[in-house]
Amino acid sequence: MLESEIEVLKKENQELKQELIKFKTFEENHAKIFNGKNIMITGGTGSFGKKFIKYVMENSSPNKIVIYSRDEMKQWMMAEEYKRNPVLKFVVGDIRDKERLSTACRDIDYLVHAAAMKIVPTAEENPGEAIKTNIFGAMNVTEVAIKNKVKKVIALSTDKACNPVNLYGATKLCSDKLIVAANEYSHPEGTIFSVVRYGNVIGSRGSVIPFFLEKKQEGVIPVTDERMTRFMINLEQAVKFVVKNFSRMEGGEIFVPKIPSTKIVDLAKAIGPECEIKFIGIRPGEKLHEAMISADDSRNTLELEDCYMIKPEFSWWDNNNHLGKSKPVPAGFAYTSDANPDFLNIEELKKLVENFLNENKTQEVKKKF
Ligand SMILES: NC(=O)c1ccc[n+]([C@@H]2O[C@H](COP(=O)([O-])OP(=O)(O)OC[C@H]3O[C@@H](n4cnc5c(N)ncnc54)[C@H](OP(=O)(O)O)[C@@H]3O)[C@@H](O)[C@H]2O)c1
């Protein structure tokens, strides 16, 4: 190779490295929006909440983070974990209690609404409770955020809210509607509200990976249906996606990340290759495949590089929002877990489970698995 060619290659390599550094810094910079600001997270002691707080504390310097939830013990343990760091303010309260929520929300700049009842059968059996927490709770969040002049609110949603077949999904759909419509009351200068919707969180409380790991000990893994597929996201991706959307939200969007799918049976095979797999049949309120965007949503859906975005159907929405960074999806497009072009194979699933185990190296988990 000629010396001049080597020089050109070296230069190109250098430029590529610079680009990568720039990209990495850009990704990490999103959290800087929280520097010096007051943040509140409802459900801050849950799986998402804990990861979100860790990420924000490691990547920005907020003035305070209010953690709002009911169980004093979870808050106590978390406060101990952070060595009573004064940036973290723990407030015991229920999202159903508007007055308490409003007191906690004073001086807040950015709010993440993560508190919810999320177990499908529990919601079926206790419908009134799911409605009070997931719907009235979301309504309270919108009202106190506007009253306290919060700048931005992101509420977490789930794939189960798209064409819901169970009460959990239906209550989250109502929550999404409340959050999007809240922009109507605060437009044009008040609080802006958006939704982030994603699928199964790998390893969150009560999710399929810890359940299969538990069953592996018994030698038989129960799987509902051989055909069943689900979207999969890990907590870090979910947190980063939420943080990123605080920078780009205009108010009214439902942001849906592009994430892989998996066949549930493949996950069982990855966790317990030596185990018997027992098909137990689809349970009440379950779908064979999940959807995050339905064909009916397609006329309002834009595709961005890393995600889809469902636009609100309100007169205040400016069609110039996100212009140049997005394109409309084809008519009739649906984002479903079975038609997803991105599927995890068994080897990738094994890696994912390994990561889960490494991240959860508590004495209890170590002992069990
Ligand atoms: N995990 C998933 O696979 C998944 C997938 C898609 C979307 N999501 C959504 O993501 C959000 C967070 O989920 P997660 O996995 O972090 O849930 P999680 O681990 O069960 O945590 C829920 C949090 O909400 C609090 N909470 C529950 N009811 C409350 C109430 N009435 N008032 C105040 N706080 C309350 C809980 O603490 P206390 O019990 O102490 O109050 C806890 O801190 C939820 O909105 C969920 O719908 C989750």
Image (spheres, rainbow, N blue to C red):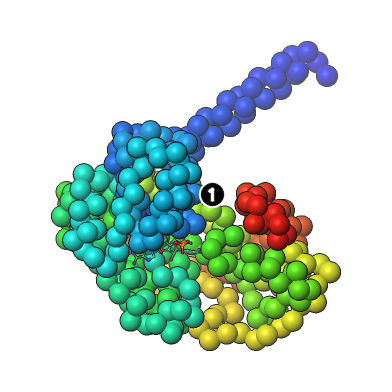
Taking the image in four quarters, ligand 1 sits in the one at: bottom left
Residue at image coords 33%, 81%: 128
* Foreground residue among 363 and 103: 363
Q: Is residue 252 above or below residue 241?
A: below
Which quadrant is the N terminus positioned in? top right
In x, y percent, where is residue 53? 43, 45
Q: Residue 351: x, y in percent? A: 72, 53
Q: Is residue 191 above or below residue 10?
A: below
Question: Which of the 4 image quarters holds residue 170?
Answer: bottom left
**In the picture, which quadrant includes the C terminus?**
bottom right
Q: Residue at x 64, y 60 (%)?
A: 342
Instruction: Give the answer, above or below, for where 148 lies relative to 200.
Output: above
Q: Position of residue 37 (x, y in %)?
A: 30, 38
Three-letter code, disc 1: Glu
The residue that appears at 65% across and 86% down in the rendered structure is: 281
Residue 53 makes an appearance in the image:
no
What residue did someone put label 1 on? 236
